[in-house]
Structure formats: C-alpha cells, structure tokens
Image (cartoon, helix red, strand yellow):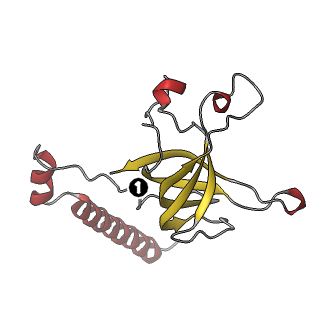
Amino acid sequence: MNRRAVGSTSGMLAGLALAAGLVLAALHTSCTPSRTDSVSARDSTSTPVVPSPVQDLIPPNTCRVRATIVAIDTSLMRGSPTDPCSKFHCRATVRIDSVRGYGSSFVRPLSTGETVSVTFVHTLAPTRNVYPEMKPELPGLMLGSSFVADIEGGGMGIGGTALGFTVRTYALVE
C-alpha cells in the first residue's frame, strides 16, 4: 500500500467524523426547547390540552353520532336471569341529531333525523345500579336524553337479516 493512499483514507475519515459531529450538533440544537417553551412547561397555570372526543379516531364498524332517546322498549329480554337486560331496559329508539363521522367498514350510513333501534350493552340504567365496579360510570339514559356515542353494527346477517345497532358507552349532552 503506498503512502499517498493511506493519507487520503485518513483524511476522508477525518472529514466523515467532522460531518457526523456537525449533524449531531444540529440535531441537539433543534431538539432543545426554546426559552419560551421551557418557561411555559414550568408554568403551573397553563391548561393541559385534552383531545376532544370528536378528534379521536373512530373505530372500525362504528358511526359517531349525537342522538336523543325518543322511545324506550320496556320489555325485558328473556333468557339468563344473570343477564342485566333481563332486569333493566336495554333497547331504545334513538333519533340521530347529527353524524360526527364514520369508522372504516361501517356499511349502513345514518342520516340526521333518522330513527333507529339500538341495544345499549350496559343497559339504560345508571351503571352504578348494574355494574357497581365499572369505571368510568355511565349516568343512565331516559326519554329525551341527548348523548354522543359510537354506534356499532347495522350490517346484514346470515340470510340477509338486518343486524341491529349497539352502543357500549356514551356521554350525556346537556
């Protein structure tokens, strides 16, 4: 190996080391918070940013709606005596007040003003009466209650039978 080839290799390595150092310095500088960022991070009076439910991703096979209870099916489901729907009302007719969005694969579009039959998985009663350990607690719904929820289902079952809509959780709207 001749001396000239070795010298150019070591010079090239020194150049690469210098370039890597400059890149690391630039990254460190860009990731360091500015003075205003660090002051606001220490400010205990600043309000934390809480994402709105509307900004959350909508799960597949669901439609996020604002709706109102227009009728409650007062019949109790028959079957297992341990099923909460055999003791509390679980089905209601709801009016869709607005559609906030759809998750992928939701096959049946809902329209504002439309009424649909919905089964509430955790019943229409306050969950403290049905599922005392459940957190967060659901306050219960009654005739005229407005709420925001992700409605699931609405597709077609075996033999072309329509599948019902289901609500797992909701938030009351005043």
Farthest residue toward the right?
159
- In percent of the image, x 67 and y 65: which residue is there? 105
Image point (69%, 28%), residue name: 83
The residue under label 1 is: 53
- Give above or below for 173 relative to 108: above
- Quadrant housing residue 121: top right
Q: Nearer the viewer, residue 167 or 58?
A: 167
Residue 122 visible, this orientation: yes
Q: Residue at x 55, y 50 (%)?
A: 71
Query: Label 1: how many residues lie within 10 Å, few (<14), some (14-19) or many (20+)?
Result: few
Task: From the top left corner, tell me how far across and down residue 37 is, in percent.
Answer: 15, 57
Say which residue appears at 47% left-offset and 32% top-offset: 126
Residue 161 at x, y percent in the picture: 83, 59
Q: Please name whichever residue, 43 or 173, is drawn nearer the observer in this view of the structure.
A: 173
Identify residue type, mark 1. Answer: Pro
Q: Relative to the observer, which residue lies in front, 107 or 140?
A: 140
